[in-house]
Each structure stands twice: as C-alpha cells, then as structure tokens.
Amino acid sequence: MNNIFLPIFTSGFDPMDYNFIVFNRWGEVLFESYDSDFVWNGSHFNGDLVEGGVYVWKIEFGEITTDKRNMVVGHLSLIR
C-alpha cells in the first residue's frame, strides 16, 4: 500500500532547483512543492482528501554538475 507519492532521485539533482506539481483532470493545481522532502499524500491544499482517479504530475529540476534543467511529466492512478 502506497500512502504517498514522491519522486526518487538517485543522485545529481539540485534540491534548491526543484518543483513538483500535481494537477487534476481540469488542470487545477492540487499540490505544489519546492522541497524534495515534502511528498503528496493524496490531499488538496486545504487538507481534504481528493477522490480516486487519474492525476497528472510534473517535476522540474536542475542538475548540479551541468546546470541543465529537466522537466518530467506523468500520471498516477489514485485508488481509495
């Protein structure tokens, strides 16, 4: 059972250059974090749990060694 959703970095990302966003199907931002240690627990900004369904996530981060910026987009299925 997974109660949280978070990216796993092996190495090389700059924790000071990090942004993680979760959207609902209408593009509304449900969660946003600039701290890689702060994870999404399936709740809205106000603390209410969101309904089960498919959500889109986007992570933007910089690399320490090259200053290259990366953007990764995906989706997750939340089952309650």
Image (cartoon, helix red, strand yellow):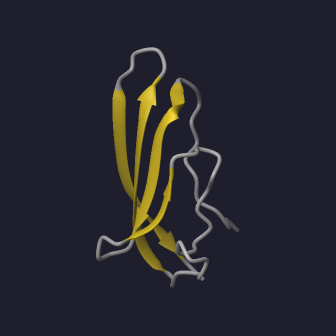
Q: Position of residue 16 (x, y in %)?
A: 52, 33
Residue 54 position (above or below residue 2) = below
| Direction from residue 14 to residue 72 in the image, left or right | left
Position of the C terminus by quadrant: bottom right
Q: Position of residue 29 (x, y in %)?
A: 39, 68
Name the residue rendered at 55%, 47% in the picture: 7
Name the residue rendered at 68%, 67% in the picture: 3
Residue 41 position (above or below residue 10) = below
**Residue in front for this viewpoint, 63 or 53:** 63
**Residue in front for this viewpoint, 33 or 26:** 33
Q: As drawn, which residue projects farthest toward the left?
A: 26
| Direction from residue 8 to residue 71 in the image, left or right | left
Q: Position of residue 42 (x, y in %)?
A: 58, 72
User: Total of numbered circles in the picture?
Assistant: 0
Q: As drawn, which residue projects farthest toward the top?
A: 65
Q: Position of residue 56 (x, y in %)?
A: 38, 64
| Direction from residue 28 to residue 6 in the image, left or right | right
Position of the N terminus by quadrant: bottom right
**Residue in front for this viewpoint, 3 or 26:** 26
| Direction from residue 80 to residue 73 in the image, left or right | left
Quarter of the figure with residue 40:
bottom right
Quarter of the figure with residue 30:
bottom left
Name the residue rendered at 52%, 81% in the picture: 50
Name the residue rendered at 58%, 26% in the picture: 11
Residue 65 position (above or below residue 76) = above
Residue 34 position (above or below residue 16) = below
